Image: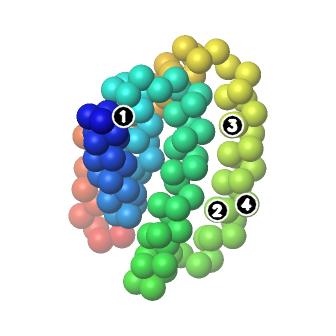
């Protein structure tokens, strides 16, 4: 029962962060692999399913507020689909340990980049 409650809290918290556009799916993936003991490949599949309703729930509000660049949508979707398909194909051929290390490296890089990022003061 306790595991369900913690998973419910993790899903709710990452759902809120997804609504903000923070990348709640990545945080959910971290929770599943680091704390819940879900294998990396299974956590990735769950994360993909999690993302669909999270994006569908938050997109109308972002669209209504004008936070979606309509000119960029089609190129982003098309290249995103191609990149996702290619990455999924590559990921299925990688050893799980290598996949975990790549994901960890990505998280470290992103975290350090955000930590040391300078604010843009020119207003651009």
Could you tell me how far apart the alpha carbons at marks 1 and 2 are, in whole angstroms? 28 Å
Could you tell me how far apart the alpha carbons at marks 3 and 2 are, in whole angstroms? 16 Å
Q: Are marks 4 and 3 in contact (CB under 8 Å)?
A: no
Foreground disc of the pair 4, 1:
1
Q: Are marks 2 and 4 in contact (CB under 8 Å)?
A: yes
Could you tell me how far apart the alpha carbons at marks 4 and 1 are, in whole angstroms? 30 Å
The residue that mark 4 highlights is: 78
Say the numbered circle drawn on residue 87.
Answer: 3
Q: Which quadrant would the C terminus be assigned to in this image?
A: bottom left
> Considering the numbered disc 3 on the image, is that residue within a helix, a strand or a loop?
helix
> Considering the numbered disc 1 on the image, is that residue within a helix, a strand or a loop?
helix
Circle 4 residues within 10 Å: few <14, some 14–19, many ≥20: few
Foreground disc of the pair 1, 2:
1
> Considering the numbered disc 2 on the image, is that residue within a helix, a strand or a loop?
helix
Q: Between 119 and 24, which is closer to the camera in this rendering?
A: 24
The residue that mark 1 highlights is: 31
- Measured as percent of width and height from the top left, residue 80 is found at 66, 54
Foreground disc of the pair 1, 3:
1
- Measured as percent of width and height from the top left, residue 58 is found at 44, 70
**Residue occupying the point 62% across, 77% down:** 71
The residue that mark 2 highlights is: 76
């Amino acid at each position: 029962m306790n595991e369900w409650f913690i998973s419910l809290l993790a899903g709710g918290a990452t759902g809120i962060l997804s609504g903000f556009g923070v990348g709640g799916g990545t945080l959910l993936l971290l929770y599943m692999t680091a704390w819940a003991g879900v294998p990396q490949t299974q956590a990735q599949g769950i994360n993909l399913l999690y993302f669909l309703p999270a994006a569908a729930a938050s997109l109308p509000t972002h669209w209504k507020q004008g936070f979606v660049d309509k000119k960029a949508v089609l190129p982003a979707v098309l290249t995103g689909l191609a990149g996702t398909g290619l990455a999924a194909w590559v990921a299925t051929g990688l050893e799980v340990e290598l996949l975990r290390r790549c994901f960890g490296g990505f998280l470290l890089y992103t975290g350090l980049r955000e930590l040391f990022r300078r604010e843009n003061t020119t207003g651009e």
